[in-house]
Amino acid sequence: MTHSFDFYFSFRSPYSYLATPPVEEVLARYDVGVEMKIVRPIAVRIPGFFQKVNPLWPPYLAKDTKRIAEMGGIPYRWPRPDPIVQDRETREVAKDQPYIMRVSRLGALAAEMGPDTNKGFEFVRAASKMMWSGETEGWHEGGRLAACADSVGLDGAKLEADAAAQATRLDASIEGNEEAQTQAGHWGVPLFVFEGEPFFGQDRVDHLLWRMKQRGLRER
């Protein structure tokens, strides 16, 4: 494998989820690897984010993501429960975030398999589809995340146990990804980085592919 790129991903970002099908197509067609860089949602990373954001943004996001999903034929519904714990009336985000941190640690641990196997992406793809497709109620229950790991050839029970036991280390790794994301030149997700060049947004996969082809990327 001669090429690889970084994929900065948040499990609470609908745009991150909507980026996974086109990335999956790229990985299937081209001789390229992807290194997943799991980050926390901006709502968790930036205290008071929802109190500061333009009130037009949330309703636009809802319309835009629905449109993208419909156009791409991607099953889509906001996860139940929401990956972050938040007061719906005040929009205050709780300090304790058991849902998003659990799945983020699992993703970060799977990503340590490296770009040569793409197991990190395969887990993220399976887990985010389970969460965002609208096919599952209670995505955090019933061993469903472990089953996603099993479905891509990982040991789900072991991944869950290791992620819980290594929580402190994995949290530090996730924060390190956030620092690297900033250094790469952007703060949002999905973000792709190839040879130090950032490509922000689920609609930048074609631009990423174009650049990698310039560097000699070939089909499998």
Image (tube, rainbow, N blue to C red):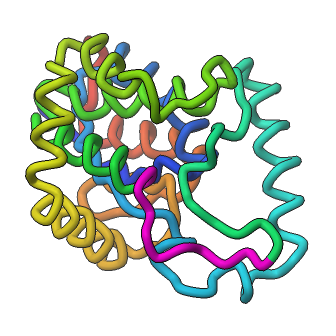
Name the residue rendered at 27%, 30% in the picture.
217
Name the residue rendered at 55%, 38% in the picture.
17
Residue 14 on image: x %, y %: 63, 45
Q: Is residue 130 above or below residue 93?
A: above
Camera-side residue: 204 or 76? Answer: 76
Residue 191 on image: x %, y %: 45, 56
Name the residue rendered at 21%, 35% in the picture.
160
Q: Is residue 70 visible?
A: yes
Q: Quadrant of residue 92?
A: bottom right
Name the residue rendered at 29%, 53% in the picture.
37
Camera-side residue: 143 or 28? Answer: 143
Q: Is residue 206 visible?
A: no
Q: Is residue 78 magenta?
A: no
Q: Is residue 92 magenta?
A: yes
Camera-side residue: 82 or 36? Answer: 82
Left or right placement of residue 166 versus residue 209 in this view: left
Quadrant (top left/top right/bottom left/bottom right) for the C terminus: top left
Left or right placement of residue 108 versus residue 87 in this view: left
Q: Quadrant of residue 98?
A: bottom left
Instruction: Give, as a single range, the part of the protein colored magenta.
Output: 90-100
Q: Is residue 205 above or below residue 141?
A: below
Residue 39 on image: x %, y %: 37, 60
Q: Quadrant of residue 81?
A: top right
Residue 104 on image: x %, y %: 34, 50
Quadrant (top left/top right/bottom left/bottom right) for the N terminus: top left
